[in-house]
Image (tube, rainbow, N blue to C red):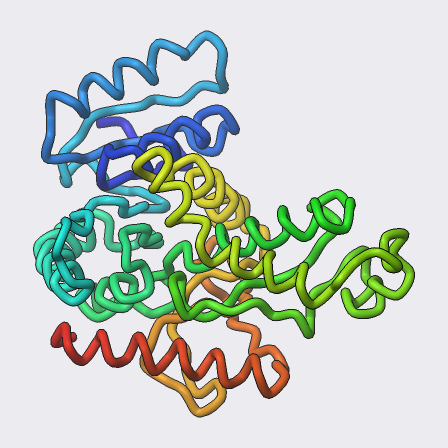
Amino acid sequence: METLKPKISIIGCGNVGMRYAYAAIIQGLARQIVIVDLDRKRLEGEVMDLSHGAPYISPVDVRAGEYADIKDSDLVVITAGRKQLPGQTRIDLVRDNVAIYKAMIPEIVKHAPDAILLVVTNPVDILAYAAYKISGKPSGQVMSSGTVLDSARFRFLLSKHCRVDPRNIHAYILGEHGDTEFAVWSKAMIGGVLLKEYCTVCASRSSCDRQFAFGQIYNEVRNSAYQIIERKGETSYGIGLALVRITRAILNDENAILPVSNLVSGYLGISDVYLSLPAIVNRAGVRQVLNLELDEAEQAAFRNSAGALKKVIREAGL
């Protein structure tokens, strides 16, 4: 197979993998996309469907492939894995997906040893850690989508409340991508102004119960996935776009700051666990993790996230 650059490979053609592929194609991020999945029939149908839009997009070669076809990939995005079944515990799900990763990651590293690995399968922090351990790659070359989507949800809801374009809001959800994630209120900014200061000049300040509103925003961010799944059965559009943002940072060597999940090494006395912190992302992967000065409550929340994930890592035998 001729290699066109940049080249992205996607492992898994479920809803998330295909929403990502569709968004990446529209934005012209790659010249070649290879998709690998066990369900060959569905995979071939998805690739045919995507390819028929060729007259309306930037040139891109989309192919249904096997692991051997991911050779020379710049980026491998891993969306494959099992979903949690009724009555199945989180630990059972972790063990099932770790078993899948133990078979899958060596194949990826064998055929695309220089690729950046971007893990999307849930529980994403645990499986990114598993991919790092199994692959033997430097931690900077193995990341997960972390809280990039959660932070987008946070900025969107703040923008609605404050009536400001979300692109002018800088605010993070950090820690676990899951129930122990937390909002970094102390660093949230609108147009370069700290949120707590912006609230004193906001046109709605006289009628706004700030603490109540912020509590509602945080709860909605944390529960968004549950609410979407209850209504439509899965989440895929938001994460697809979040993955495109990470991909653009990598392939364009942007040095963009994104809250991806990467290895924590000594921050707040915590090590050997994957959690989301703002990180500089470029063609080499994670160039640097930025250790924010959090307030006491946020530090406690980060430690809580780390403790929860370390417990799962131990119970899963990683």
Indicate the quadrant containing the N terminus: top left, top right, bottom left or bottom right.
Answer: top left
Residue at x 21% of width, y 75% of height: 313
Q: Nearer the viewer, residue 135 or 44?
A: 44
Q: Quadrant of residue 215?
A: bottom right
Residue depicted at 44% across the width and 44% down the height: 243
Is 219 drawn above or below residue 185 in the view shown? above
Report the quarter where the C terminus lies.
Answer: bottom left
How many marks on residues?
0
179 over 81 or under it: above or below:
below
Residue nearest the observer in this picture, 188 or 180: 180
Q: Nearer the viewer, residue 73 or 150?
A: 150
Residue 228, horizontal then vertical, whole percent: 40, 41
User: Residue 219's spot in the image, x, y percent?
Assistant: 52, 59
Residue 106 visible, this angle: no
**Residue shown at the point (56%, 50%) measured from the top left:** 152
Q: Does residue 176 lie above or below 170 as drawn?
A: below
Q: Residue at x 32, y 51 (%)?
A: 120
Foreground of the two, 76 or 212: 212
The quadrant where residue 8 appears: top left
Residue 312 rendering spot, x and y as whole percentages: 22, 74
* Residue 253 on image: x %, y %: 54, 50
Camera sees residue 277? yes
Q: Is residue 237 left or right of residue 135?
A: right
Q: Is residue 312 left or right of residue 241?
A: left
